């Protein structure tokens, strides 16, 4: 399942990874061959059907949480793929470089989850970006900030629901990358806001949100309906 990486088509167009993105994808593919992925493969053979009638079922237990992360990575990858297809008016060279790098990370994250989950992965989600003006810097960066802050809060909120230590380690490695994205986007919008009090609490800790809170926000950018009824709650 993880020895051969399958790169699917984007929802409209094809995934276009830079050389650095391809390197990251290969790294994640190799990482997927570690004990963490082996444990995941074993768990995949015992979990619930991800496709009930009432929306796309994320599943239960750790598999459900990993599908939850996969859904969010799909959303982020689709957003940055769209952003980098035609940059907003006035995008600087450094802004384009940053956004291309984030796109590559998000595609690598998405592909990692898809390949590691195998036949327990949820299907590709249909997005709805009709609220976003992709010609507007404020609209694009504002949405990027919302997605990155949401992603960091989502991983932080889901950590307590993961039972397998290898999965928690994986989530920690990904959330640290998401936090780098959030800090960079924040500074592009307002220099020095990378870790202000809207992202970090009085104890210096990133904020966290539970899956229902995260999915409520994500639903505003999805045509696909997500069924999270079987996710663990504690």
Image: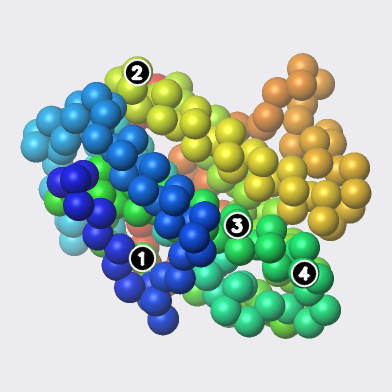
Q: What residue is disc 4 on?
A: 93
Which numbered disc flags the more N-terminal residue, 1 or 3? Answer: 3
Report, in whole angstroms, how far the alpha carbon at label 1 lies from the one at label 2. Answer: 28 Å
Q: Decide: is 172 above or below 198.
A: above
* Residue at image coords 29%, 52%: 114
Q: What residue is disc 3 on?
A: 101
Rendering quarter of residue 16:
bottom left
Q: Could you say whether the residue bearing mark 1 is in a helix, strand or loop?
A: loop
- Give the mark toward the camera: 1 or 3: 3
Q: Quadrant of the C terminus?
A: top left
Report, in whole angstroms, how far the alpha carbon at label 3 lies from the one at label 4. Answer: 12 Å
Q: Could you say whether the residue bearing mark 2 is in a helix, strand or loop?
A: helix
- Give the mark toward the camera: 2 or 4: 4
Report, in whole angstroms, how far the alpha carbon at label 1 lies from the one at label 4. Answer: 31 Å
Q: Position of residue 140 (x, y in %)?
A: 71, 69
Outermost right residue = 191
Local packing at callout 2 (Cα closer than 10 Å; few below 14, some 14-19, many 20+) is: few
* Residue at image coords 21%, 44%: 2
Q: Position of residue 78 (x, y in %)?
A: 48, 67
């Amino acid at each position: 399942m993880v020895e051969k990486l399958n790169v699917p088509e984007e929802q409209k167009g094809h995934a276009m990874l830079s050389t650095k993105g391809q390197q990251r994808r290969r790294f994640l593919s190799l990482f997927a061959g570690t004990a963490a992925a082996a444990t995941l493969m074993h768990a995949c053979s015992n979990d619930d059907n991800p496709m009930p009638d009432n929306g796309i079922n994320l599943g239960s237990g750790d598999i459900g949480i990993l599908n939850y992360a996969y859904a969010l990575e799909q959303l982020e990858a689709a957003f940055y793929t769209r952003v980098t297809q035609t940059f907003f008016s006035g995008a600087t060279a450094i802004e384009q470089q940053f956004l291309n790098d984030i796109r590559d990370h998000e595609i690598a994250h998405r592909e990692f989850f898809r390949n590691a989950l195998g036949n327990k992965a949820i299907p590709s989600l249909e997005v709805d970006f009709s609220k976003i003006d992709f010609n507007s810097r404020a609209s694009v960066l504002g949405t990027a900030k919302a997605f990155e802050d949401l992603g960091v809060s989502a991983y932080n909120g889901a950590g307590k629901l993961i039972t397998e230590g290898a999965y928690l380690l994986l989530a920690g490695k990904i959330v640290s990358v998401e936090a780098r994205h959030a800090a960079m986007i924040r500074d592009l919008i307002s220099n020095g806001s990378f870790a202000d009090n809207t992202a970090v609490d009085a104890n210096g800790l990133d904020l966290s949100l539970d899956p229902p809170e995260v999915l409520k926000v994500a639903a505003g950018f999805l045509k696909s309906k997500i069924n999270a009824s079987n996710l663990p709650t504690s």
